[in-house]
Amino acid sequence: MKLEETRPGVFVATMTAHELSVLVAGARMSLSLLEAEGSTDRPREALETVLANVDTAMARARDRRGAAG
């Protein structure tokens, strides 16, 4: 995995599909724990937003791959 900070607080990640899958799975597990523990809304909503953005980006990538194939 390669991480590059392109400007303060903004990173570009280059990783394999497996590495991405592990990170997303960990985030989904964290969200599950936050929901089960009745955590405050702010951290849960932030994580939900990040995961929704990941899902959207992955769907776009799949669509581009399908259109190219």
Image (tube, rainbow, N blue to C red):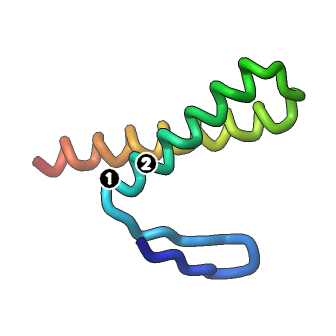
Amino acid at dot 1: His
Mark 2: secondary structure: helix
Mark 1: secondary structure: helix
Distance Cα–Cα, label 2 vs label 1: 6 Å
- Residue 48, given in percent of the width and then of the height, sits at 67, 33
Q: In the figure, residue 19 lies in which quadrant?
A: bottom left
Amino acid at dot 2: Val
- What is the number of the mark on residue 22? 2
- Residue under the image location 69 percent in, 39 percent down: 47
Q: Is residue 55 above or below residue 32?
A: below
Q: Residue furthest left?
A: 69
- Residue under the image location 39 percent in, 46 percent down: 21
Q: In this view, does 27 lie above or below 39?
A: below
Question: Which residue has dot 1 on it?
Answer: 18
- Residue 54, given in percent of the width and then of the height, sits at 52, 44
Q: In the figure, residue 1 lies in which quadrant?
A: bottom left
